[in-house]
Image: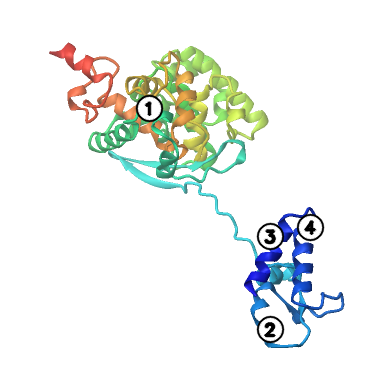
Amino acid sequence: MLHIYKNCFRAMTSQSVSGKTTLSSRLAKQIKVTKTKATTAKQELWDIEDLHSVAATTAPRYFSPVQTRKQRQVNTLPKSNLPAKKARQDEVSKTSKIKIGTATIIKCELVPPNETMLELKVEEAAAVKTEQDFPNANWLQHLENIRLMRCEKPAPVDTLGCHQCADQNANEKTQRFHKLVALMLSSQTKDETTFEAMKRLKAQTLTPASIQGMPAVELERLLHPVSFYKNKAKYLKQTSQILVDKYNEDIPDNIQELLKLPGVGPKMAHICMATAWNKITGIGVDTHVHRIANRLAWLKKSTKEPEQTRVQLESWLPRPLWSEVNHLLVGFGQTICTPVRPNCSECLNRHICPASASVLAKKK
């Protein structure tokens, strides 16, 4: 019986008519099986798997159009009884806490581009890419070593960063505003200076309405000695006005609207989304991240501006790592990979860092 089926299949493939019609009709003809009638009950139909038992009986058999039994059972089920499709579970990083030095850092939700979830884990993403896709083949070892060094050596950003500047007793909306203000003050300013300025502002009740109603001279006095404190006072006044008028004294919950606020650039906006809304929309690249990425050759070509560095890093760094890379590299840059006279002798990456050889040679 098997050879009959094979012969029919060969004949079917040589003709241009429908495969199912040709094969079913030839089978019926060669083994003298009555063709399916419209009135035949579904439970009386036989499937192709039942061919081997046809010879055992002379009773008429009605064959369904050639398909497997499993296919026919599914195809003839009412829609209400069809097997439900498994709900797709997007692998979004759940909010969790991780310890770095003496600080507890929030690991945030990932917000993918174009609303398409990236389901690759770090290991899977690294496996998909070839070595040619990464600017430096040692990048993952670099990162692991930086994690180890950061755990052993606390940095100012751990206790004085913008995520630590919000009043923990305030409501969530006010805390989000505090984090935004701290970021606006942090540009080209040490964490210690920003933290002290935030303490003075919070002592005056820091809200968009209070900033809006505060005299510019008084605001400048509270911000000093923050770098460019007069410009930053002006930006704070303008931003506070917008938040009162458009956002009910809250801050925007998306990167596009944050970037429209006076004095808010890409670095601030991406870090604000992470710290205030627990959503990762991009990598916040400040002077430390910019410098270290160039020193470690994490870029396909060297960059002069932080924004250029951000674009290159996001083009290859696995997205699940975006939530931690800013905090890791900022603290690393504050303690070991400093702007001037970096402590390469203390660095676990000194043997695999492109910049360490020249630095160590100068110290000899």
Going by the numbered disc 4, the residue's amino acid type is Ser
Give above or below for 194 relative to 48: above
Q: Earlier in the sequence, mark 1 or mark 3?
A: 3
Tag 1 residue = 195
Q: Which mark is residue 18?
A: 4
* Residue at mark 1 to residue at mark 4: CA–CA distance: 76 Å
Which residue corresponds to the image point at 67% horizontal and 30% vertical from the top-left? 246
The percent position of residue 306, horizontal first and vertical second, equals: 45, 19
Disc 4 secondary structure class:
loop
Secondary structure of the residue carrying tag 1 is: helix
Name which quarter of the figure residue 15 lies in: bottom right
Q: Picture quarter containing residue 362?
A: top left
Residue drawn at the location 29% of the way across and 35% of the way down = 141
Q: Are marks 1 and 2 in contact (CB under 8 Å)?
A: no
Q: Nearer the viewer, residue 206 or 321?
A: 321
Q: Counting residues from the N terminus, which is met first, the one under dot 2 or under dot 3?
A: 3
Mark pair 4, 3: CA separation = 14 Å
Residue type for callout 3 = Arg
> Which one is earlier in the sequence, the residue at label 4 or at label 3?
3
Quote the CA–CA distance across marks 1 and 2: 90 Å
- Density class for disc 4 (Cα within 10 Å; few <14, some 14-19, many ≥20) is few
Callout 1, which amino acid?
Phe
Residue behind mark 2: 55
Would you say 184 lies left or right of 360 here?
Answer: right
